[in-house]
Amino acid sequence: MTNLEFSTTVKRAFSILALLAFILTACRGGGTSASPPTAAPANSSPSLPAEQTAAPSPNRSDTAVPAGVSPIPDAAYGEANGVRYVQIPATECANLTATPILVNDWLVYPMHEHSMGCDNHGPYQYTLFGYNLQDGQLYALYTGSNGEAPLLYSPEQNTVYWNVVFGGTTLLFDPQTLEMRQKMSVGMTSDSGGAVLDGLYYFGSINAPGSTCQEPINPNCGALFAIDSGGNIAHQLTTDDGFRAWIGTSVTTDGDYLYFGSAAQTIGEKSGDETAYLYGCSVIKTDRELNVLASFDPGDLACYKQPFQGANMDSVSGEVVPDGTGLWVQYVRPNDVDMKSVLYRLDLNLQEQCRVEFDFEPQTQSVGFYTAPTVDRDGNAYVAAAVPDAQNTRRGQLLRVTPECQTTLLAEAPGSFAHASPTLADDQYVLFATDGKL
């Protein structure tokens, strides 16, 4: 797919392409990304054409633009090989990780920047963006927060939910006016997306190793919550209930139950002591009241601390993907001394049915933190992974995996990461993003 038109019906594919264009142009302005984003890694700086165009002339009679919301003043608009893009000022701190979502005539997505070890922040560090499909302009819909995960629009609840890593925990917006109508906080932030089931919004919180969570122990770190449309907590599962695990994956549901993927279960010092099981580095199934019904913890108990420096524990990536008859689960890193990263096929009771193993090289985690399989109508999963080559560097791969875990290699990108979720378009095409290429 080479052409991108804003009237396309392939909304998810369009979202990936629109975000890719944004990331590439942000990179051109000097930004790089050391962390793996959802739509396309931004750690390269591909050249873009010098051709740029002025912002399209707005037609306010046909465009519902909220009062008080103005276009980004220093946005530049252009086209590269049939793909329209928007370029805004950004710095090396830029770490855009959330795929845009469609809210009526808007593509909505948040800015995110690295906070640790990065001081040169850009002018839109705390901005929620909206690209208007009617007038073709980029707007700042809200300032004061940023986030790593996609927002969620629930027409049934008439609410747009945004989990943030700064400026609260969850912000609730009106989908017609795009005005924030509620900000709620559980005393900790969230870096993953949520899900709506029976009128409640479910999400999890981070469990960082710093003092905010650990000195003293904050029971709402690494916890699960359900809130109503007014932002009131209806159910919760916290350290006080024997649960403490960083919910680094977006919540999913099959319409009956909820599925969570977790990372570190740090409580106090992050020592790697995993003698107690607090649901770290696991898949968790709950009912609507957040009672744990089952968990899946492959390899060593809870989290496996790997023998190298850096972010070195196994964790579930992206989201747990239900497909009607089972679940697909991909791990970022190995979960035991065999040092293989693994894609698991589970049944709905979290029992392993089969697996696909990938070779692992310590300098290259196998998948991005935000990466998840995509499933077609026949139940085949499309999976991205980065594996070492003969020189022990890396190559990005795209595979099709049957429900029996039979694999077919569809594409390969030598020397590249493959840290983005594959995207299925019309059940015919698979968009595969590596670091700088689509």
Image (tube, rainbow, N blue to C red):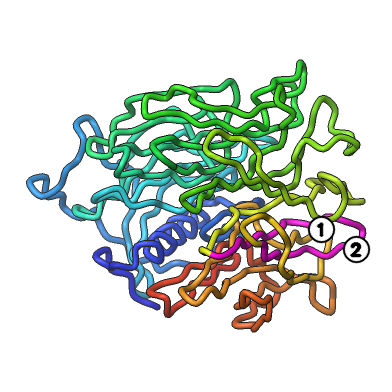
Helix, strand or loop status at disc 1: loop
Marks 1 and 2: CB-CB under 8 Å?
yes
Q: Which mark is residue 338?
A: 2
Q: Badge 2 local density, few (<14 within 10 Å), some, or many (20+)?
A: few
Residue 165: in magenta span:
no
Q: In this view, does 300 lie to the left or right of 133?
A: right
In the picture of the structure, the residue carrying the numbered disc 1 is 334
Q: In which quarter of the image is the N terminus?
A: bottom left
Residue under the image location 53 percent in, 66 percent down = 374
The residue nearer to you, when weighing 178 against 404, is 404
**In this view, 432 is above or below 26:** below
Q: Where is residue 318 in the image (x, y as percent from the top left)?
A: 60, 53
State yes or no: residue 337 in magenta: yes
Q: Kindly give the residue lying farthest to the top in the view shown.
A: 216
Q: Quadrant of residue 238?
A: top right
Q: Which amino acid does label 2 sit on?
A: Asp
Q: What stretch is highlighted in magenta?
A: 325-346
Q: Where is residue 276 in the image (x, y as percent from the top left)?
A: 86, 34
Q: In this view, does 411 lie above or below 203?
A: below
The image position of residue 342, as x and y in percent, is: 75, 64
